[in-house]
Image (cartoon, rainbow, N blue to C red):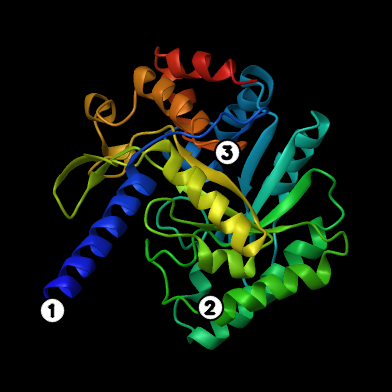
Amino acid sequence: MFNFLKTLFLFILLIVLLLGYFCLVGKEKKAEKITWGVVFSSKHSQLLGLDWTKNYLAILDDLGAKDLKLVAYWDLIEKKENDYDFSALDWQLQEAQKRNVKVLLVIGRKVPRWPECHEPDWLKDKEMEARNEALFRYLETLVKRYKDNNTIWAWQVENEPFFPFGECPEFDEEVLKKEIEIVKKIDDRNRPVVITESGEFSLWFKPAKLADIVGHTLYRKVWFQELNTYFTYPFAPAFYGRKAWLVNKIFGKKVFCSELQAEPWGRVLLYDLPLEEQKKTMDLARFKKVIQYAQNTGEDRFYLWGVEWWYWLKEHGEPGIWQQAKKLW
């Protein structure tokens, strides 16, 4: 009995040490070529009090970004049932195309920025089945419109659908599968479907089963509501690179960072957070460290989260992060 317990203890200790090494130790070799992109939200820009069109053009012409993640907001496109207005998204794609910028387009119900799910108001009182059918019709219309657009290199279907965050209906995997099916059926160019997942709280196996490519978030310092304090994740850069390696070996899927923290994450929404408190989780020094950290994961594609905020800072006399980000391109 003693020998059994000793063996069991040593086995558990070995597992703990391996997990500790996997999560907390090391960095990966820097990729030979890294693609840096930015996530842009017209909604977020407006809520910051900016002219989102000027913000967008500055990203293209001043910042010089060559890869964008753009968001198709259902509630802006279909304000009335079966009455579609694609003008804002059309313009964003046209301006990107003029400059040979490549776009990852996020589509679906749950897309970037709070409250995460952006359904039209006319859906609110409908049963879930009817809401899902409306979602499918909307996706069919959207993908048909943009399936021949050369600027779009991939479709991101939903945003972190397996991660329970935001003011959203209960997640239904069958609905997600149907959304992917719609995209695959309509897009005869066979562009990849990206499914994203939390970088810190998942092994990314669920999205890997459904997607052609897996995207993940990467955050360093955030407000942790459960602890009522600011918290820096203890993970080593290799934590992300090793998980990417696992997904590739098990599922044969490519992995990249679809959302790299380059904006504050505070106790309230950014629009209500004083500037001094914003700097507790992101400033120029932290921005530089985040870029270095990302390089040490060994991954080769990152979309930075916060470009609207950099522009807001620049417009308010603090251009440091904006100027530093320029160096990436």
Count residues near mark 1 (Cα–Cα under 10 Å), then give few for <14, some for 14-19, many for 20+: few
- Name the kind of residue labelled 3 in the image: Glu
* Mark 2 vs mark 1, CA separation in Å: 46 Å
**Residue 277 location (% of width, % of height):** 22, 29
In terms of secondary structure, where does tag 1 sit? Answer: loop
Quarter of the image that includes the N terminus: bottom left
Q: Residue at x 35, y 23 (%)?
A: 286
Mark before the other along the chain sequence, 2 or 1: 1
Residue to which mark 2 is pinned: 173
Mark before the other along the chain sequence, 2 or 3: 2
Q: Residue at x 66, y 78 (%)?
A: 178
Tally of numbered tags = 3
- Name the kind of residue labelled 2 in the image: Glu
**Residue 275 location (% of width, % of height):** 27, 26
Residue to which mark 1 is pinned: 1
Depth check, front residue: 10 or 17: 10
> Compared with residue 163, is residue 96 higher up or lower down, i.e. above or below?
above
* Mark 2 vs mark 3, CA separation in Å: 28 Å
**Residue 38 location (% of width, % of height):** 58, 35
Which labelled disc corresponds to residue 299?
3
> Compared with residue 326, is residue 244 higher up or lower down, i.e. above or below?
below
Q: Is residue 235 left or right of residue 145?
A: left
Depth check, front residue: 100 or 301: 301
* Mark 3 vs mark 1, CA separation in Å: 47 Å
Quarter of the image that includes the C terminus: top right
